[in-house]
Image (tube, grey):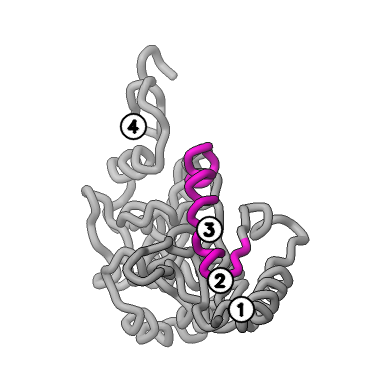
Amino acid sequence: MRGGLRHLIKGVYVVAAVPDSTGLRCAALSLVVPDDCVVVDRHAGWLLGAHMVLAPNEHLEMRPISMFRPSGRGRLRNDLSVSGERNLLPSDIVEVHGVPVTTAIRTAWDLGRVRWPSQAITGLDSMLGLGHFTHDELLAGVERFKGMRFVTTLRGVAPLADGSSQSPGESVLRLRWIEGGLPTPRPQLPVWDGDSLLGILDIGNEEIGYAAEYDGAEWHSSAEQVDHDRARRRDIQDAGWTIDVFTSADVFGQGIDPEARLRLGAATARQRLPRRAS
């Protein structure tokens, strides 16, 4: 800090009152890094408009920007970036507000090549939801990365990607549903009573009348939100549906097994099928 300025990176200062943000860091890096540096992975997704793609709580605690260079050109070394080399083609790069970033589909392929399927599905869902490429196009490019690190995760998770998912928690809950062997889940499933829409379920299967909802703190914590959720779910349950509600602790908590709860919920829904049909 020097008077009214804050030192972001060598050669770059900002007015001290300006809050830290992912966008600010990307803009600062674009002023001083070599022209061949490209923002990749979740920060590329964020710049492209997939605002839910950042790591949990990254809006509260900034992390170094993922900024890589084409293979053979070395890595960046500064406090604002985490860097390396990547096999980028010219067609893999687009400019966003003066910052080179990987295209939406290249970003999706990169986000799918990670160790954990739960992390991969959140990235793939978020990028597919932008509408810049189709699911078929996503699948068609997978084998480009044959032999590369964690491509097996991409192969396994890409067919499950769905751009209609509304949050990382929903994406992971849908993955647990599939891993639990339940009937095919449909994200953002509308439930009708004649011409009246009773509500939209986060994840559900109409054949067995079972749904799982993910209540993230941001959209399901105020008194008004809680009352709305309660009324909506009561109407849908009165129509014969079985609904289980999951929170972050239920999906991401250590030692938690959401699959067991999903299987139990589906079994309960099946037992109620005769009553629902009547």
Q: Which residue has dot 4 on it? A: 12
- Dominant SS of magenta comes to helix
**Which of the marked residues, 1 or 2, is nearer the chain's N terminus?**
2
CA distance separating discs 1 and 4: 67 Å
* Comparing labels 1 and 3, the label whose residue is closer to the camera: 1
Instruction: Return the x and y of residue 243 as percentages of the image width and height.
Output: 59, 65
CA distance separating discs 1 and 3: 18 Å
Q: Which mark is residue 233?
A: 3
* Comparing labels 2 and 4, the label whose residue is closer to the camera: 2
Answer with the quarter of the image where residue 19 lies.
top left
Q: Secondary structure at mark 2?
A: loop
Amino acid type, callout 2: Gly
Q: Nearer the viewer, residue 203 or 129?
A: 203
Q: Which mark is residue 275?
A: 1
Is 238 part of what is drawn in magenta?
A: yes
Answer with the quarter of the image where residue 95 lies.
bottom left
Amino acid type, callout 3: Arg
Measured along the vertical axis of the image, is residue 47 above or below residue 193?
A: above
Q: Secondary structure at mark 3?
A: helix
Q: Which mark is residue 45?
A: none
For the C terminus, the image quarter is bottom right
Measured along the vertical axis of the image, is residue 88 above or below residue 65?
A: below
Answer with the quarter of the image where residue 27 lies.
top left
- Are dots 2 and 3 in contact, CB under 8 Å? no
Amino acid type, callout 1: Arg
